[in-house]
Amino acid sequence: MRFKIFFCSILVILLQVSFQLHSHEATHEQPRLERLDHIAVWVADWQKTANFLTNVVGWKLHPVRFAAAGETIGGMDLVFVDGQGLWLELVEPTTPGPGMDMLETLGDGAIVELDFWANNYQLSLDEMESRGIQMLNMDGSPLKDRGRIIDGVMKGGDIDSSEYIAYFPPDLTGGTAVEILERFLDDEDSIINKRDKMWGVESLNQPIDPNVPRIDHLSILVEDLEKIANFYSDVLGLKRGIEFETDGNLNEVGGFKAVFLNANGIYEKDLWLQLLQPVGPGPVMDLLNKHGNGYVLEIGAEVDDLDKFYDQMKEKGITMVNLDGSPLASGEKGTTIKPYGERHYFPLERSFGMRIMIYERGSSSTSILHQRDSAF
């Protein structure tokens, strides 16, 4: 079932119409490097979701608007939101088709894909071939013509440019949709190029607003931590960070073991993937059982003062909650989760289905996040 959903999402991602994604010219002289540029989030109403992310969370909506259409995918509107560390691509299916079917299956706010750009796309393909890994087209068929796509419509004009994208087999990723893309910086029609040039981020150096939550990591639920960690490190080439296991007595989440991998974010800061394998009963195990292997659980965004953020949200009519949606303990503005620090969540009905954890890390002597960062 998850395999079918994966390729349903792939068909729809014709939306990545511009996605000769973010790299320098792809030549064999460049060493291979994949950077996590954005995630694709399926939404029922992009304007409502974008309004929440901008007016409530404090992130920024990019002025670029674009769309995709076709008999095999249906219509959809797309926008980018800057999450301070990671772009969120909001995808709203607008007509019947695979995109609309996936929205109905996964629900509003589902994170359906991780999108990496390869600075040397051909080298990446060559390495996968040498390893005996069959890369895939959008429809799940074996890759041909380097994954070339020509399609797309930008609001206000046509796009007549090709792009190259390839997907890893879901048996390697654990079911998470993981895509690599090629980008040419001299392509004037590329939406990604337009997006970045409009905000001056070609140098991968976007300033961070300390008063707004900064996306630090994505958490992914897995059934076999070592197997999936090996994909991201040995195949995709991400550097493996600290690994740890809880004692199994975390009532708020349940026991788990975890590993961090550096996803080579597009900003001048680290961006992480956190793989979580539940090892005991609790909300995390429940979510794995419900959604399956490779489910992207949440976006983790950091603030300097969790109590202050709680009060700011309260002024906007939002009361933050625990992971499972239950109220925080009486008089508390967050839940302390060792070995991280304090955290709370937006109620899913207020965040339009997108699970966003807001946290304040613990002291440098106890927080696993400080230990993680110091290792790099």
Image (spheres, helix red, strand yellow):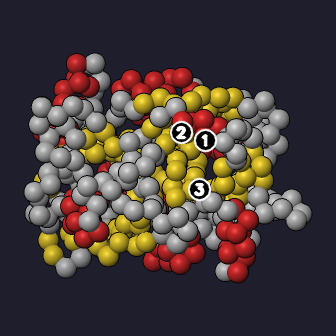
Q: Name the residue tied to disc 1.
A: 369
- CA–CA distance in space, label 1 to label 2: 6 Å
Q: Tag on residue 302?
A: 3
Residue 69 is left or right of residue 27, and the answer is right
Q: Name the residue tied to disc 2.
A: 373
What amino acid is labelled 2 in the image? Asp
Please determine whether, in this image, residue 281 is positioned above or below residue 61: above
Q: Which residue lies furthest to the top in this view?
A: 131
Dot 3 or dot 2, earlier in sequence: 3
**At 75% across and 62% down in the image, what residue appears?**
321
**At 57% across and 75% down in the image, what residue appears?**
56
Residue 70 vs residue 213, the one in the foreground = 213
Please determine whether, in this image, residue 21 is positioned above or below residue 54: above
Kindly check if marks 1 and 2 are in contact, taking CB atoms under 8 A apart as contact: yes
What amino acid is labelled 3 in the image? Glu
Instruction: Tell me the quarter of the picture where residue 364 sits.
Output: top right
Would residue 365 be visible to someone looking at this image?
yes
